């Protein structure tokens, strides 16, 4: 078997462990030790690390499959694996040689990375490196990590935010994860004041030129981040729909049950078709991209747009499937169990900035041919690309901040300004952001899957 097949098979096997330990993980506010160790033993933590450092450089399509399997077992487990696996992998590709030797040396167990990449703190130049300060939120997987991947904007530098890699012990942790969904991710906040980071442990966040590894990393952090969230959404949505199916089958033959309802039959068919259609679109887009990366081609604007659209669509479908399953599940869905947990977890995932309405609107503007001469930076469209002032920037960007804080809207619901606000301010000042303005409360609701 190939390495890719081995990892997919391992993820499929571990899905059952993720599922059986999900309730305990929620209670603890972090994954169980058994599952964390299984991720180490299977090589899943290192699936996006460069092969020269002992990783797998897992291609997009098998990466989606891995995340679907783990997220099917438990949404929190899939979220932690994608967030920490992403930080571990991209840091390995882009940090300097001295840092790579320190953090990814052959001796001892793998140091897992986590952190906050879309809510930049402040950095100032110092002798041999930088001093960073800030309050960072939503560090998914930090309780299973030894290093932190943290974004900050360097004062006085005409460049995008940088990623700074530190040890977890360099920061002050705030165990404040009290949330509705994704409870087992342990996505707590952390704070640092004047933390020194040597030059080798930092890199420009938008770079797409890896110091080690191949074409996978030419998508930048954002390309891998979109793979993460897409596989996660598909896996959790499939689980909640399968749970509803089991519930309906268990009640077959009872008068007035779901199994006897023609309205349920129709709505279930619509939900199944929507989810399968979304998944087919995802795999169509990423199969084409994987082929292009194999030929070492730079992704086109259309490809960068379509993978963002596939994520927006699959997440919207996942949310609507969850609403249908919860409503159809009756009191069973109300009680503690997989349907209730998946419902909470999916709706927690929809709060991430990566699936905010302006991103969807941006994909529409590109595909409608309304923004010639623009490219993607982070989750915004920008023009006048050469004004960035850095040598290597991707059409992608940083996408792994777990939750979108107040300010954006989802389905007509207003959220206040927060995660990404400082980043958007940098974009507006330096680049002339072309992404659409956030919709105000009450406009542009996504609508229902079943209407």
Image (spheres, helix red, strand yellow):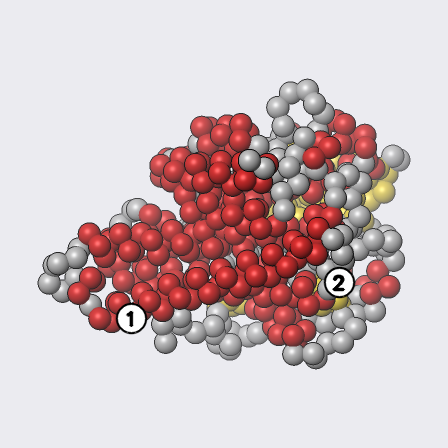
Q: CA distance from mark 1 to mark 2?
A: 46 Å
Q: Nearer the viewer, residue 12 or 450?
A: 12
* Screen quadrant of the C terminus: bottom left
Q: Which mark is in front, 1 or 2?
A: 1
User: Mark 2 and mark 1 in contact (Cβ < 8 Å)?
Assistant: no
Q: Which residue is rendered at x = 49% and y = 30% of the image? A: 38
Query: Which residue is labeled 2 in the image?
Result: 427
Q: Residue furthest left?
A: 255
Which dot marks residue 266?
A: 1
Mark 2 surroundings: few (<14), some (14-19) or many (≥20) residues within 10 A: many
First in sequence: mark 1 or mark 2?
1
Q: Is residue 224 above or below residue 191?
A: below
- Count of numbered tags: 2
Name the secondary structure under disc 1.
helix
Q: Which residue is rendered at x = 84% and y = 60% of the image? A: 388
Residue 285 image point, x, y percent: 60, 61
Q: Which residue is rendered at x = 36% and y = 72% of the image? A: 450
Q: Is residue 414 above or below residue 145?
A: below
């Amino acid at each position: 078997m190939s390495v890719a097949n081995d990892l997919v098979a391992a993820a499929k096997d571990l899905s059952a462990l993720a599922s059986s330990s999900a309730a305990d993980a929620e209670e603890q506010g972090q994954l169980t030790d058994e599952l964390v160790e299984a991720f180490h033993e299977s090589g899943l933590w290192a699936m996006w690390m460069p092969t020269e450092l002992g990783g797998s450089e897992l291609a997009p399509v098998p990466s989606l499959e891995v995340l679907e399997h783990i997220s099917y077992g438990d949404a929190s487990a899939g979220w932690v694996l994608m967030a920490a696996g992403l930080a571990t992998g991209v840091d390995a590709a882009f940090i300097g040689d001295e840092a790579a030797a320190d953090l990814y040396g052959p001796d001892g167990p793998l140091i897992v990375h986590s952190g906050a990449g879309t809510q930049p703190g402040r950095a100032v130049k110092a002798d041999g490196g930088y001093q960073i300060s800030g309050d960072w939120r939503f560090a998914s997987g930090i309780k299973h990590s030894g290093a932190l991947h943290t974004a900050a904007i360097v004062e006085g530098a005409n460049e995008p935010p940088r990623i700074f890699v530190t040890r977890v012990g360099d920061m002050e942790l705030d165990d404040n994860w009290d949330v509705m969904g994704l409870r087992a991710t342990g996505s707590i906040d952390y704070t640092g004041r004047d933390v020194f980071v040597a030059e080798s442990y930092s890199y420009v966040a938008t770079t797409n030129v890896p110091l080690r590894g191949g074409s996978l990393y030419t998508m930048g952090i954002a390309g891998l981040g979109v793979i993460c969230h897409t596989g996660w959404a598909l896996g959790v949505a499939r689980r909640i729909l399968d749970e509803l199916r089991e519930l309906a089958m268990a009640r077959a033959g009872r008068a007035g049950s779901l199994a006897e309802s023609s309205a349920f039959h129709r709505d279930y068919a619509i939900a199944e078709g929507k989810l399968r259609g979304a998944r087919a679109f995802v795999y169509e887009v990423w199969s084409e991209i994987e082929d292009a990366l194999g030929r070492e081609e730079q992704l086109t604007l259309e490809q960068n747009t379509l993978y963002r659209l596939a994520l927006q669509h699959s997440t919207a479908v996942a949310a609507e499937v969850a609403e249908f399953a919860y409503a159809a599940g009756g009191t069973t869905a109300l009680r503690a169990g997989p349907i209730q947990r998946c419902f909470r977890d999916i709706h927690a995932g929809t709060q991430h900035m990566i699936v905010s309405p302006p991103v969807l609107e941006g994909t529409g503007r590109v595909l409608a041919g309304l923004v010639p001469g623009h490219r993607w930076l982070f989750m915004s469209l920008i023009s006048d690309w050469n004004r960035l002032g850095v040598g290597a920037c991707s059409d992608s960007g940083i996408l792994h901040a777990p939750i979108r804080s107040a300010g954006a809207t989802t389905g007509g619901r207003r959220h206040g300004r927060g995660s990404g606000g400082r980043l958007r301010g940098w974009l507006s000042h330096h680049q002339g952001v072309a992404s659409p303005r956030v919709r105000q409360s009450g406009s542009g609701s996504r609508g229902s899957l079943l209407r």
